[in-house]
Amino acid sequence: MNDLIWLVPLIPLVGFILNGFGRNIFSKSLINLIACGSVFISFVLSCIAFGEVWAARSAGAEGIFHFHFFDWIHVGDLKISFSFLLDPLSSIMLLIVTGIGFLIHVYSIGYMSKDPGYGKFFSYLNLFIFFMLLLVLGSNYLIMFIGWEGVGLCSYLLIGFWYKNNSFSSAGKKAFVMNRIGDLGFLLAAFFIIGTFGSLEYNEVFNQAAGLSLGGDTLLIITVLLFVAATGKSAQIPLFTWLPDAMAGPTPVSALIHAATMVTAGIYMIARSNILFVLSPVTMNIIATIGVCTAFIAAFIALTQNDIKKVLAYSTVSQLGYMFLGLGVGAFTGAFFHVLTHAFFKALLFLGAGSVIYALSDEQDMRAMGGLKKKLPITFVTMLIATIAISGLPPLSGFFSKDEILLHTFTDSPILWGVGMLTALFTAFYMFRLLFMTFYGKYRGTEEQEANIKESPKVMTVPLIILAILSAAGGFLNLPEMWGGGFLANFLAPVFADANQIRPVAEFTHSTEIILMVVSTVAALVMALYAYRRYAAQEGNIALSENKEQNFLQKLSYRKLYVDELYGAVIVNPLKSSSRFLYKVVDKLGIDGIVQGAGRMIIGSGRGLRQLQSGYLTFYVFMMVLGAVFVLIYGFFGN
Amino acid sequence: MDKLFILLLLPVVSSVVLLFVKNIKGAKWFALVASFIVLALTLPFLFSFNPTAEVQFEQSWQWISSLNINFHIGVDGISLPLVLLTNALTPLIILSTFGKNYSRHLYSLILLMQMGLLLVFVALDAFTFYVGWELALIPIYFICALWGDGDRIRINLKFFIYTFFGSIFMLVAIIFLAQQTPENSFEWASFTALNLSSPVQGWLFWAFFLAFAIKIPIFPFHTWQPATYTHAPTPGTMLLAGIMLKMGTFALIRWLIPIVPAGVTAYGHLALLLSVIGLVYASIIAFKQHNAKKVIAYSSIAHVGLISAGIFSWNQAGIQGAIFQMISHGLSVVGLFFIIDIIQRRTGSIELADLGGLASAMPKLAIAFLVLVMAAVGLPLTSSFVGEFLLLKGVYTENVWFAVFAGLTIIFSAVYMLRLFQKCMLGSVNPKWAHVEDIKGFETVVLIVVVFFVVYLGILPGGILNISEASVANLLEQVSF
């Protein structure tokens, strides 16, 4: 199998090429077969690869395999190879990307069935899977960067998939540009890494880094730059505003790219580089702080949004913030665990929302929903499970992963824990608000619309059910130590071994752990009940009460803290004005003015000018003669 | 072995023959076939080139013996990629004109220009170089002045005077240098063997720099460029942006830096600074341009700013990156100008305000356009990424802060290129352009070739990098400061 690892990304690429060329020729079933089939084969191969890593781990080995294909860029002593790294971390990511990717491909068969751009859509999805797999499998930072930028391209294409809508294509552009700000950080970090370690290969960089002292300046620069890259891709402060706009894309895209996989690339990258980060405590603090702040403000914004996908988008930003918080406090396993569980329940939430939107013929405003529980039973039950999971109620998956992060945060800094806890309360509230506004109470549309609502086809509900099972049971992959300890932590141990040695995982007593669990569970329950009273118990008036903007805080939340407006005023508009200024004043009047003026002076009189305008040929001959004279004169001097 | 000379001779001969071909269609095909033969004859050089630092396929004849001027030509790892670029782009450029009825003289001029360009790249004697340098200017002047639009006479006059003005300083410098050599030779080898004092090298630096900086153009010598590119006929713009500006960047590597290393020590940082300023400056201006050609024109200033910056950082990554990026930029910019030409022919306008929603009527064009936009923003797996990565790495090695500012290009290029793409192709469909025809025939051929090589070089850059590696390493060893 190990010799076939290159097939894992290659097969989706072939799928992209086939469907790309055949998008208008192939029948829908052929497109489905190519698109879903290629990801499925990739998934099977990933399972085999995972099995090999597993077998190696069980045998007590580290389970790290290296595959070299060819030298990509070779200049002087700078050598960048095209090579893959299969280890416990990447093997799990492979499963997430291809597994959830496959489910979402299948779901899309139903969701996109009426779209004229059917073939194009699936070819883009396959291309995305290809780049995401490169990102995950690369054995050095530059191969990761190919994937990193490639998924950005796919994100751009899929956000603006309905390109005739100008605001959708603008949302795609915004995503691409904001990601690029982060990408500059990535590139600069790569240069610093080459400058310091002479290589971009993970094993060489990390082996050398393990010998460096704690808190060096170079490592600080490298890690901060890498974190800047992560804030772009994973939508953290200050580069988070593209992700909510990215909801312009078809809902399966939101589930796959903007929830389950691509946006976790930043966390993956930092977890991958864990050794560099633990050696730079300042960066770790920055990450934890930015993470928890992002988690908090995104949850705050999500409290009042009425667009079902917007709520989920801000929720994603918020959950990503948790993951960064986990990384920042050194809970690498916990953060990665949350990547995993979040992939399950957030993909499920988006697909569930998609199922609702599909049933309501593209309605996304929750104020026009309500009472869908009976009409969409499978969607409802699966979304209920996902909501419980994300709210951190035991024993569903989100409880365990969030708990692990918060526990480590508590031992690291009670203040950060406090903010994280508050965010968890918000999360429970806005998620249950979403659930109740959508599925409880009375339907708030017209009766005619109501009559047409029916559950989505099997091709959509089966993926929901599978994801619901994973969301419910995923937590058992990494139980707290007191309940038998985690499979995941053991499995990943070699990846984080050096980092854990430098920064030992904090000690805590079981009683602390239990108290924290009880506190967070009770708090989440209270919030769920509060949401129930507010949105499910009172029938009918939700639309009204949510239309009013009552007080300052609500308005602030509803208006998304005016961040877009701020960026517009501080960055975008000044750049636009300076563009006009530089063009009209500096370039045309200033620099070109001098050139023209000098030209006139040299050419001299009006007579000369008139001659110039009388015909280019004359002037040309004149210049040639002048040139010849010059040559002659200097020729004489030469002899 | 008169092969290299034949490579130079064939375009001239074809150019002369074309004057006697009476019908336009015949002229088109004759020019295309001739340029293909030249390309085919280039391939043996590529395959038999030995990737060492040696100058190969060298030929030399006495030219003006009283002045000790030789016609001395040869190819090394630095010039071979550019020879290849010239000979590969020329047939593409000729093919791209098939949709319009230019007169046969256009083809004659294109082929004449090809010879001038080749001469610049293969010259090993300063006088030979200078002849090629000026020879390339004459056809392009006529191309732009005869088939351009708008205020073409005035604009081209400015272009001509400006570049010629720069060249004169270079000529003075060349003649001065020849006098300094023991045998009054114009040979590259004797120029670089000179050991001149720093002040002398200082003014020589500026004399050469001015000529090259205007041609490239480097900020603030760029103001001729946007108007010239915009009002030139598309084949003219392609020649200018695709190949001709590379004369300047190539000359920096071949002539300026090796001849006056002390001058570069004194002023190289200033040149690097100007390159980086130009990059940021032109990118910002490109944000709000209303004309598609002007967006590409300013983006081109930004891109060559990075190339020059890489060259002035004078290290392996920077120079190899520069050579690679010259190829890559040549390819993608020719493709982009062609796409804009197609849009203009279909809709009659390249004002962004008039366009929009073309993707629905022209999906194939949209794909090619998107790939080239991605190349222009330096997305990995396109050739530009390899070039920009190496260039930025080179600049980083020289000065971290310059790299940070030069790196802004990856953000800014995304802003203006995606805006261009959106304004042309995306958004609601303008009913006027709802039924325009997608690319077909020769258009498809040109774009497929360009797109293929943009992607191919992005995945397998090794071939070109391998050609230049030894020559660049040798040059760096020879000229260090």
Image (tube, helix red, strand yellow):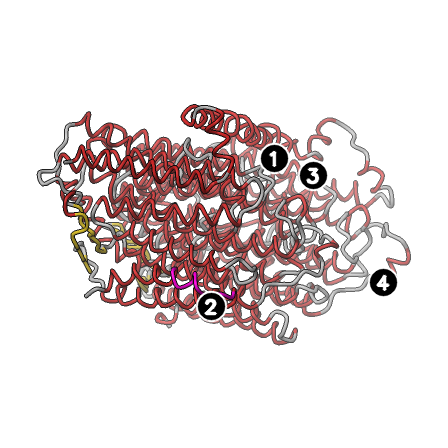
Q: Measuring 69% from the left and 39% from the top, which residue is drawn there?
A: A303
Which residue type does callout 1 highlight?
Answer: Ile
Report the chain holding disc 4.
A
Q: Are marks 2 and 3 in contact (CB under 8 Å)?
A: no
- Residue A319, x across and y down, in percent: 57, 45
- Decide: marks 2, 4 in contact (CB < 8 A)? no
- Residue at image point 31% right, 54% down: B118
Question: How many residues crowd mark 1 within 10 Å: few (<14), some (14–19), many (20+)?
Answer: many
Residue A303 is labelled as: 3
Element type where label 3 sits in the image: loop
Q: Residues within 10 Å of mark 3 (few under 14, many from 20)?
A: many
Asked whether B17 falls inside the magenta stretch, the response is yes
Please report the bounds of the magenta region as a residue range: B16-23
User: In whole angstroms, how far apart are the C-alphas of marks 3 and 4?
Assistant: 30 Å
**What residue did someone put label 4 on?**
A452
The residue beneath circle 2 is: B29
Looking at the image, residue A613 lies above or below residue A199 = above
Q: Which mark is residue A297?
A: 1
Picture quarter with the N terminus of chain A: bottom left
User: Do tag 3 and tag 1 residues touch (Cβ < 8 Å)?
Assistant: no
Dominant SS type (magenta): loop
Residue A326 shows in this picture: no
The residue drawn where x is 83% and y is 42% is: A542
- Quadrant containing the C terminus of chain A is top left
- Asked if labels 2 and 3 share a chain, the reply is no
Q: Is any atom of residue A481 visible in this view?
A: yes
Residue A98: x, y in percent? 51, 64
Give how far apart the Cα atoms at labels 2 and 3 are: 68 Å
Q: Residues within 10 Å of mark 4 (few under 14, many from 20)?
A: few
Mark 2 vs mark 4: in front: 2
- Which x, y percent locates residue A135? 44, 55
